[in-house]
């Protein structure tokens, strides 16, 4: 076995998994709070990437330093995408909270199509080049054939985002309110939790992580278009379901498992069936563990 090739596949899978995890966290947080599958979440990721590209273009013309451009563009993308997430929740989902779940699901699909076409009309249908904003690191020179600087930044960013979200959920007042709302929304309201604010904050946090992922991944891949959110969003949703939707550790585990599955299958068997392998693996997992790898088994109330 070629060890270098194996590690290249392993790190490639870790990169894919980290990318999916940044998006899957938004899916699983929203589902955990209001049991809604937000199909427009992938488009928030796409909007984050486009916002980053616009800011990068302006700052590059102004002659700013590359690292400063990356930091400022990331902040701008996070804030802009978070505002989209907040607005989307108020317009498309809040009026439907007492409606059947199917109504909210259809609203999510409609919002996804609306955002895709909005960006298509406002920007272009062509792929746009996205500059590489991550500098070369000297300490990676010996292994740069299997690990790129952009991949290392994606790993570190995903780990930091996970740590911050875990701290927020476990140790802050907002995190406790989110957990209470997730367990029983009506009881949370009775004990004084502002459920509306908790739900809005969930959308804001999910959109922010997706936007951060969008700009890092765009910088890694080198191009974007209005459709990038669709497939990435579907894969991230698959990862969230694979790990157990509603569980944050499950979303990360599912993303990593999906990333490695795709990477090893395409590396050792065929790249023509990358998506087939991913969805086949999901089917097999769900046959034996319908609630996902770390999902909680639903109990029937009597």
Image (spheres, grey):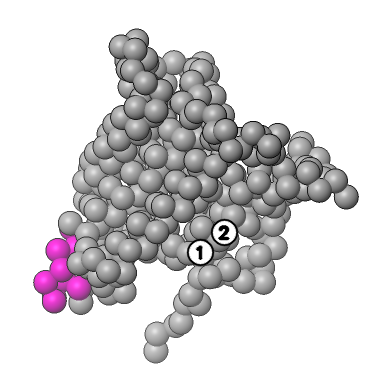
User: Dot 1: few (<14), some (14–19), or many (≥20) neighbours within 10 Å?
Assistant: many
Residue found 37% across the figure and 21% down from its top: 65
Asked if residue 24 is positioned above or below residue 272 in the image, the reply reads below
Nearer to us in this view, 75 or 141: 141
Q: Position of residue 297 (x, y in %)?
A: 50, 77
2 and 1 marks in contact (CB < 8 Å)? yes
What residue sits right under mark 2 in the picture? 254
Q: Position of residue 11 (x, y in %)?
A: 65, 46
Residue found 28% across the figure and 47% down from its top: 204
As drawn, the residue found furthest toward the top would be 61
What residue sits right under mark 1 in the picture? 250
Residue found 39% across the figure and 28% down from its top: 67
As drawn, the residue found furthest toward the bottom would be 302
Q: Is residue 190 left or right of residue 263?
A: left
What element does badge 2 sit on?
helix
State the extent of the magenta-drawn residues as a range: 188-196
User: Dot 2: few (<14), some (14–19), or many (≥20) neighbours within 10 Å?
Assistant: many
Residue found 59% across the figure and 44% down from its top: 15
Asked if residue 129 is positioned above or below residue 294 in the image, the reply reads above
Q: In this view, does 18 lie to the left or right of 192?
A: right
As drawn, the residue found furthest toward the right would be 1
Q: Where is residue 90 in the image (x, y as percent from the top left)?
A: 21, 46
Nearer to us in this view, 117 or 23: 23
What's the mark number on residue 63? none
Nearer to us in this view, 97 or 292: 292
What element does badge 1 sit on?
helix
Can you say which quadrant of the picture contains the C terminus? bottom left
Q: Is residue 301 left or right of residue 220?
A: left
């Amino acid at each position: 076995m070629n060890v270098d090739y194996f590690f290249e596949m392993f790190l490639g899978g870790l990169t894919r998994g980290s990318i999916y995890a940044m998006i899957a966290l938004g899916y699983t947080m929203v589902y955990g709070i209001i049991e809604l599958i937000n199909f427009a979440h992938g488009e928030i990721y796409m909007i984050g990437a486009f916002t980053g590209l616009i800011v990068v273009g302006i700052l590059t013309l102004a002659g700013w330093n590359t690292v400063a451009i990356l930091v400022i563009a990331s902040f701008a993308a996070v804030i802009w995408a978070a505002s989209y997430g907040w607005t989307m929740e108020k317009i498309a989902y809040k009026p439907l909270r007492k409606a059947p779940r199917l109504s909210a699901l259809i609203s999510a699909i409609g919002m996804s199509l609306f955002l895709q076409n909005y960006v298509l009309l406002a920007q272009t249908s062509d792929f746009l080049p996205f500059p590489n904003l991550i500098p070369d690191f000297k300490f990676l020179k010996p292994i740069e054939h299997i690990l790129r600087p952009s991949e290392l930044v994606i790993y570190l960013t995903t780990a930091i985002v996970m740590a911050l979200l875990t701290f927020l959920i476990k140790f802050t007042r907002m995190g406790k309110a989110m957990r209470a709302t997730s367990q029983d929304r009506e009881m949370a309201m009775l004990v004084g939790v502002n459920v509306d604010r908790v739900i809005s904050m969930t959308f804001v946090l999910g959109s922010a992580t997706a936007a951060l992922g969008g700009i890092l991944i765009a910088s890694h891949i080198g191009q974007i278009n209005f459709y990038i959110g669709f497939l990435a969003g579907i894969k991230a949703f698959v990862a969230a379901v694979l790990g157990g939707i509603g569980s944050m550790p499950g979303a990360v585990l599912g993303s990593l498992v999906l990333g490695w599955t795709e990477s090893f299958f395409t590396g050792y068997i065929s790249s023509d069936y990358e998506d087939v392998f991913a969805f086949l693996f999901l089917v097999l997992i769900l046959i034996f563990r319908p609630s996902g790898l770390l999902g909680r088994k639903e109990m029937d109330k009597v």
